[in-house]
Amino acid sequence: MKVLTLVVLLVALTGMVGCISTQPNRGDISFPVYTHAFPEAQTLYVESFNEIMALPPAAQPFITKIKETAEQNKTSLTYELAESMFSQRHLGVNYNSDANSPVAVTFTNSEANCLSLTLMAYALAREAGLEAQLQQVDIPEYWSRKQGYSVLNGHVNLTVWSPSDKQHTHRLIDFDSRLQKQQFAAEPIPLGRAVAMYYNNKAANALMGGDFPRAFRLLSEALKLDDSFAPAWVNLGVLYRFNDYHGYAEQAYLRATQADAKHLTAKENLAILYRLTGREQHAQRLFAEIRHLRRENPYFHLNLGDEAFEAGDISRAKEYYFRAYRLDRQNHMVLFALGKVAHADGELDSALAFLERAFNSARFDTDKKRYASKLAVLNDQYD
């Protein structure tokens, strides 16, 4: 199995509504993490920073082995470490979008999401005596649907180099070669930001699962590490909104926009809150700004199509999917979506054609297997 690179950074939750709340604003509005909102959260166990980053005992023999391999092959340690991440003879890591695991568990299972895999690679590099730099990759806004929610995804990777290398030759460790080839800009981030992302990922899953106290505790930990991490503020705002703390939610969303003025999902959630609390003019202004900036993003239209499809509006879904298709005719997810609505309309020939194109355009084994199973079902309908 190849490795996908989807990291859950925040939950947009654009379709949810609730009752208006007028609770007073209390606490430090410059850091609106209100513990009294979820008092039971403080007793919950969450992994510490050191527990998340600790390597297991089995890591030492692994590092010794790759050092020996580098000596025997007269290659660099950076090269051998990077190769070992993907070699089936060594770690042979696999992608699992739901596996937000600490480094020791990731190493033992050789399976995790992109962020957890990258944290493991960072810990191994540092333990091997190499320099390492985590990076957040500036990819276009891209959503996936999970448990009925719109989830915005991001990407991180890692560069490693030897301190003894006077040329400082960097080796990139990236669990998505497709993104690497597209050469998106990448911004160096400290380890604290990456661990804040880890807490945020787990908080997003807890939030979607309805475990609000755990989500709050995890988001609190994320923001203690990095209070400039906008996605954690957005998720905290969503959490507050779900529990009718609308004043607190607005403070959290505004903190997100202060941390990142270009964060459209923060603005989108703020616009939803404005509409929910009767401030329609403010909401419309923000929605118009967001639509204007997203109009050329195929993933935006794909996500709207998915929402319409889940609501049973096949005609509307098809309209959004074709908008996405006009912007990107080779995107396997768009092609699959078009096959999905064609099948819903009883157009089996079109559905089969789009699914075959989706299969041929997909790069990862997990996607190809999924499309192959759909194709098998369709072919059975012709028998």
Image (cartoon, helix red, strand yellow):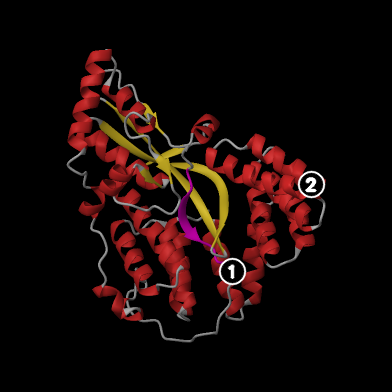
Viewer-nearest residue: 228 or 351: 351
| Residue occupying image coordinates x 33% and y 21% | 169
Residue bearing the label numbered 2: 382
Which mark sits nearer the N-terminus, 2 or 1? 1
Crowd class of label 1 (few under 14; some 14 to 19; many from 20; radius 10 Å): many
Q: Quadrant of residue 76?
A: top left
Q: Is residue 315 left or right of residue 118?
A: right
| Residue occupying image coordinates x 29% and y 34% | 132
Q: Quadrant of residue 114?
A: top left
Q: Is residue 110 left or right of residue 59?
A: right
- Give the distance between the C-alpha atoms of the residues marked 2 and 1, in whole angstroms: 47 Å
Amino acid type, residue under disc 2 in the picture: Tyr
- The answer, for residue 255, to whether it is visible in the render is no
Q: Identify the magenta region.
A: 5-13
In reply to whether residue 72 is colored magenta, the answer given is no
Viewer-nearest residue: 360 or 26: 360
Viewer-nearest residue: 70 or 379: 379
Mark nearer the viewer, 2 or 1: 2
Q: How many numbered markers are drawn?
A: 2
Element under disc 2 = helix
Residue bearing the label numbered 1: 271
| Residue occupying image coordinates x 28% and y 14% | 73
Amino acid type, residue under disc 1 in the picture: Ala
Tag 2 near tag 1, CB within 8 Å: no
Q: Is residue 64 above or below residue 22?
A: above
Task: Please provide percent x and percent y for residue 200.
Answer: 39, 59
Task: Please provide percent x and percent y for residue 199.
Answer: 34, 58
In reply to whether residue 12 is colored magenta, the answer given is yes
